Amino acid sequence: MAEEKTNNAKETEESKQPEAEPVTEPEVDQKEETVEAGTAEFEDFDESFNFNTETLNKLDYLNDLQLNIYIELGRTKMKIKDILELERGYVIELDKLASEPVDIFVNNKKIAEGEVVVIDKHFGIRIVNLVDPKKMMQGLS
């Protein structure tokens, strides 16, 4: 009877352990896919500056764009102490002569030179020289 109990105990222990399932490797598809590749072909890029009506229509949306424009009469260097002592009527000497053209900048890029004119007690600038468009475009890309 003691042998029956030990056999029953062994059977219950074995029945408690889950049976291990055999490990199978996943099936691997041995087919190789072939990919065809070709060279992309594009139209030639026209670099001419000839504007036609279609080009102008594309640029119409830029008409309302606001840009910062400033005129540089000349430059000078001053110490902060001297700037704080400025008073009404003080004259600051610039590095340009009165007859030299002033520089015209658009968004910190020099685009032209001009001369100062007075019209009905108002100052204005008459453009006398435009910067070469190739030089203007340098540094933009």
Image: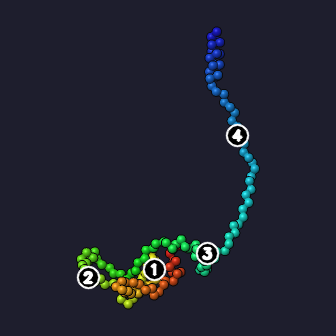
**Residue for badge 1:** 110
Q: Disc 1 residue type?
A: Lys
Task: Give residue 58's quadrant in the image.
Answer: bottom right
Q: Disc 4 residue type?
A: Glu
Front residue (pair 137, 80): 137
Q: Find numbered disc 2 in the image and state the secondary structure of the residue it sits on.
A: loop
Q: Nearer the viewer, mark 1 or mark 4?
A: 1
**Residue for badge 4:** 25
**What x and y, as percent, mark residue 118?**
37, 87
Q: Nearer the viewer, mark 4 or mark 3?
A: 3
Q: Dot 3, crowdedness within 10 Å: few (<14), some or many (≥20)?
A: few
Q: Is the residue 119 above or below the residue 68 in the image?
A: below
Q: Nearer the viewer, mark 4 or mark 2?
A: 2
Q: Find numbered disc 4 in the image and state the secondary structure of the residue it sits on.
A: loop
**What x and y, as percent, mark residue 76?**
33, 81
- Left or right of 46 on screen, residue 78: left
